[in-house]
Amino acid sequence: MDAVRIDSSARLMAERDALLERSGILQEEQADAVFGIVNGEGKLVACGNCRGCSLRCIAVDESCRGEDMLSTLVSAMLEYQFMRGISHVFICTKAKNAPIFAGIGFYEVARAGDAAVLMENRRGGFGGYIAALERGSGVQGAIVMNANPFTLGHRYLAQRAAESCDSVHIFVVREDASEFSFEDRLRMVREGVKDIRGAIVHSTGLYMVSRAVFPSYFLKRTEDATAVQAALDANVFIKIAAALSVSRRFIGSEPFSAVTNEYNRVLMDTLPKHGIECRETERLTINGCAVSASNVRRLLASGDKERAFALLPPSTQRIIEQIL
């Protein structure tokens, strides 16, 4: 039996939904393509989604396990990914399934206990990413930011980190799931911190704060998914920090987002256990209001450029002027 794309068939998609439910996997609304395997009786016995650079929602009917179904399914999904130019592919799976995926060519990046394991199809991919990162010296800190866009608040956090570190590694989220592109956000950060002593700007690659590491589809509750994703991100960061000799992680206080608050909680609980101090800095306020990138985006969308620009460093203002 071969794996084929099934998202044009209402009947097979309905069978896919039922198979996911039987397997305890939540259905995701968004998928770039859905693949499945149909047996001789026309019944769907395996399925999986391609979304971005990840393979997701993979399930095999109990009656067919052990018949190389998974290998056939994943091979077809990888071929689809390669055909559209995606050669670096991720799977996030329950820890008990990690050996199965290791047997078909995936390699562990990090794990969150028994809850989830992040794997990639590139041997040494994560190690190569770490090896290519620019090194700093002395006492080293780190910040991870989306910078959508880079605000005076982001700059304030970088300045505060630089006050207590010789080098500050600033990781900009690579994934393009924001209003401003990664290239624009990276340029905003580089221009915005170029006068800050010891600032070193990196891309997160696909390893931190990425949909590739979001395991919501096999966890029961949203809060579980947030905590597990945060734990995966934390454990990826711990490996990066060890290679760079980073001993401090800086985070901003979060008065607006419950999800970010959960991330911060997990970081503050996890990092010290691995010798990394986690310092939370009170968010910068202007005229009594906390500076927020989401507020900047709202002001820009409403046409209130003057108030939006009051929250941005001149370098970000110039870049946005070029974009608009």
Image (cartoon, rainbow, N blue to C red):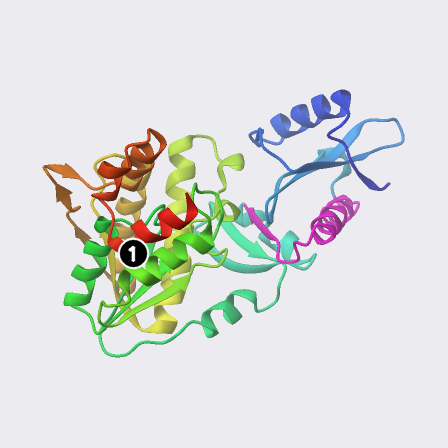
| Residue closest to the eye, 19 or 283 | 283
Q: Is residue 173 visible?
A: no
Residue drawn where x is 33% and y is 58% of the image: 189
| Residue closest to the eye, 80 or 103 | 80
Q: Quadrant of residue 228?
A: top left
The quarter of the rendered structure image containing the C terminus is: top left
Residue drawn where x is 28% and y is 37% of the image: 305
Residue drawn where x is 80% and y is 38% of the image: 4
Residue that mark 1 sits on = 315
Looking at the picture, does residue 135 appear above or below residue 97?
below
Q: Is residue 292 left or right of residue 43?
A: left
Q: Is residue 84 magenta?
A: yes
User: How many numbered circles are shown?
Assistant: 1
| Outermost residue toward the left in this view | 288
Residue type for callout 1: Ser
Residue 260 position, x and y percent, is 31, 41
Mark 1 residue crowding within 10 angstroms, few (<14) / some (14–19) / many (20+): some
Q: Is residue 190 visible?
A: yes
Q: Is residue 249 left or right of residue 114?
A: left
The quarter of the rendered structure image containing the N terminus is: top right
Q: Which residues are magenta?
A: 66-93
Residue drawn where x is 43% and y is 30% of the image: 221
* Mark 1 element type: helix
Looking at the picture, does residue 122 appear above or below residue 99?
below
Residue 166 position, x and y percent, is 21, 74
| Outermost residue toward the bottom in this view | 137
Q: Quadrant of residue 157?
A: bottom left
Q: Is residue 232 magenta?
A: no
Residue 164 position, x and y percent, is 15, 67
| Residue closest to the eye, 191 or 204 | 191
Residue 298 position, x and y percent, is 32, 32
